[in-house]
Amino acid sequence: MTSASASSRKALSKIATNRLQKELMEWQVNPPTGFKHKVTDNLQRWVIEVHGAPGTLYSNEVFQLQVDFPEHYPMEAPQVIFVPPAPLHPHIYSNGHICLDILYDSWSPAMTVSSVCISILSMLSSSPAKQRPADDERYVKNCRNGRSPKETRWWFHDDKV
Amino acid sequence: MAKGVISASDQAEQLKQDGNLYFKKNRLGAAIDAYTEAITLCPNVPVYWTNRALCHRKRNDWKRVEEDCLKAIQLDHKSVKAITLCPNVPVYWTNRALCHRKRNDWKRVEEDCLKAIQLDHKSVKGHYMLGLALLQREKYAEGIKSLQRALDLGRGAHPNSYMVEEIWQELATAKYHEWERDSTKRSWDLRNLEDSCEAALKEKHSRDASKEEDDRDEATDSISEQLAALKSVFSKAAEDDVPIDIPDYLCCKITLDIFRDPVITPSGLTYERAVILDHLEKVGKFDPITRETLLPSQLIPNLAIKEAVEAYLEKHGWAYKMD
């Protein structure tokens, strides 16, 4: 999973490092329900296990999120994708890209990894059907050169799911 | 008549400003180019050399740092001349102090800064370097006071400048070291007092026990209770010196760090000034939590939180620890 944007990534700024250390400390004391941070020594890339919520279409399924932080986090959103195989969901493409407004246009620096995770789980939990987005094949083909989802121009047409 | 000369120095000054701008954006290559051009135009201005040295320093190019600083010091020895000619210009004094600082000649830094401050009570650089000099000479309390003054003045002039951040770092480090010194002594004193109290209590108990043979069990209970109580009293007394989580209401929701210069928005939420300004410029004109429209002009200092932070830090000096 070395996309072009990830390999040319700049090191975290001092503010970003400081804030991520605090987030990680808070996560260790008080992790969001259904998530497990996989321990690494890399503050700039978090790998997080997601457990489908009981009573939903994804109960007993486990997925992996990969969160990459830009130099100027939290003034810029992190890049969040599912490591394939990604869950079957109308807003999740088979390459793991997630169509969720807070990850792109609606990002706010007051959000945290933890709050983003909760939003993603809630998106999964409210899914009516296990299916890929209608344009999955076309979209994934367009991303074949390792393009980051942050470079996509997203249309957020449906906020019910 | 001297039109050409004037425009060269004006142009060099403009290049310096450009360089400073690039430096702030961490575009070191562009900054170095700008300062180099300024130096080519006016090689006798020490600050062009020291600014370029600062760029080399960020790149860890220490050989060039040394070269540029030596050049600046060489030039600024001549600034003695400038001071002799016009002793009432504070910046001559602070610039000379800067040279003494690079040579670690802290006594002279102190002298020059005092003179600069005398001329200009609001000289941020003067108070800043005076503070550093005093700390170096182990006059901690006075040094901290000078840094505090420099920080207040700097915030008044340029709230989110590179200099204000640097002054804060120095001040926080000094305050942390002050706490380390004081708390070490406090815990030592408490430790000794606790040992004496414990010994006295045990002695009293054994004296009492030798008098009344009958109630030995009861006496043993009461002594262990008293010893436990004594321990808890002493651990309470040491509580403020034990680092814990800083309360959330004293921390910015963006930095997650304790407030330095808190400002409140019309939504009633408080953020760190430099960071919320950065957000309004780079992310969007909205309150990060409520998403209501927000303009820089709507930010108001939150003095109550600022005082609460000061009171907290006064009591819990460990919270000054950076990183």
Image (cartoon, rainbow, N blue to C red):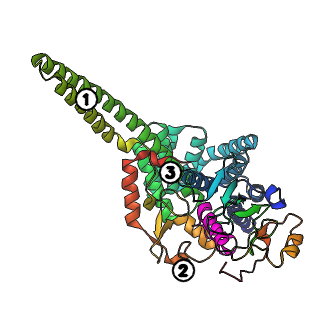
Residue B191 among those drawn in magenta: no
| 10 Å crowding of disc 1: few (<14), some (14-19), many (20+) | few
Judging from the image, mark 2 belongs to the subunit labelled: B
Residue at the left extreme, as displayed: B211
When asked about the image quadrant of residue B302, the answer is bottom left
Q: Residue at x 41, y 61 (%)?
A: B306
The quadrant of the rendering that contains the N terminus of chain B is bottom right
Q: Which residue is mark 1?
A: B224
- Dot 3: element: helix
Q: Position of residue B95 (x, y in %)?
A: 58, 50
Q: Which residues are magenta?
A: A101-127
- Mark 2, residue position: B292
Please give the residue where the numbered disc 3 appears in the rendered image.
Answer: B128
Place of residue B76 in the rendered image (x, y in percent of width and height, measured from the top left): 63, 46
Tell me the kind of residue under disc 3: Tyr
The image quarter containing residue B91 is bottom right
Q: Secondary structure at mark 1?
A: helix
Mark 1, chain letter? B
